[in-house]
Image (cartoon, rainbow, N blue to C red):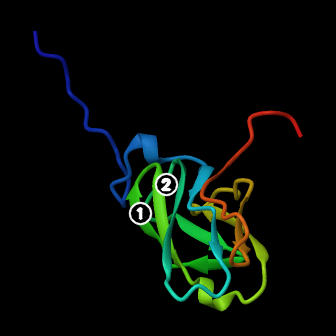
Amino acid sequence: MTEDIKPIDVGPEGIRPEMAGAPTITALQPAGAICSAPDDITMIVEGDHFNRSTTIIFNGHDEPTTLIDHQHVSTGVKPSLFVVPAVCPVTVRNDGYALPAALDFSFTEAGAPLVTSAAKSKGKR
């Protein structure tokens, strides 16, 4: 006996159910760069519930964002714009949802240890 098959409503952007909901971020790859470095880098934000409306917010500014999949988005970072050490908060936004807690991207001086990965701590602060 054949059951009725009902189509799944995926919305106007074709968003699958696993992509809907409030975004979360869990890691940055890399999580830092050397101040004044001449080469731009690609930073990947890892998390969940990313879709075509997801925007990376780097140091308070919306950045051009590329959707890789529902767990990864990326943007370009220009270390040449930072001439002194700095820590920049990174978060994401999906239309209609609150921002998740930010992770830090660090610019360090040449010779200082470079942070290659940042992840949220699972312990209490």
Q: Nearer the viewer, residue 111 or 78?
A: 111
Q: Which residue is mark 2?
A: 50
Residue 106 in the image: x percent, y percent?
Answer: 72, 69
Residue 124 in the image: x percent, y percent?
Answer: 86, 35
Q: Residues within 10 Å of mark 2 (few under 14, many from 20)?
A: many
Q: Is residue 91 left or right of residue 86?
A: left
Residue 68 in the image: x percent, y percent?
Answer: 38, 59
Contact? badges 2 and 1 (CB < 8 Å): yes
Figure label count: 2
Q: Which mark is residue 117?
A: none
Q: Residue furthest front?
A: 111
Marked residue nearer the N-terminal end (2 or 1): 2
Secondary element at tag 2? loop
Q: Amino acid at mark 1?
A: Leu
Q: Residue furthest top?
A: 1
Q: Is residue 123 left or right of residue 3?
A: right
Secondary element at tag 1? strand
Q: Which residue is mark 1?
A: 67
Q: Nearer the viewer, residue 75 or 85?
A: 85
Rendered image quadrant of residue 102: bottom right
Q: Residues within 10 Å of mark 1 (few under 14, many from 20)?
A: some
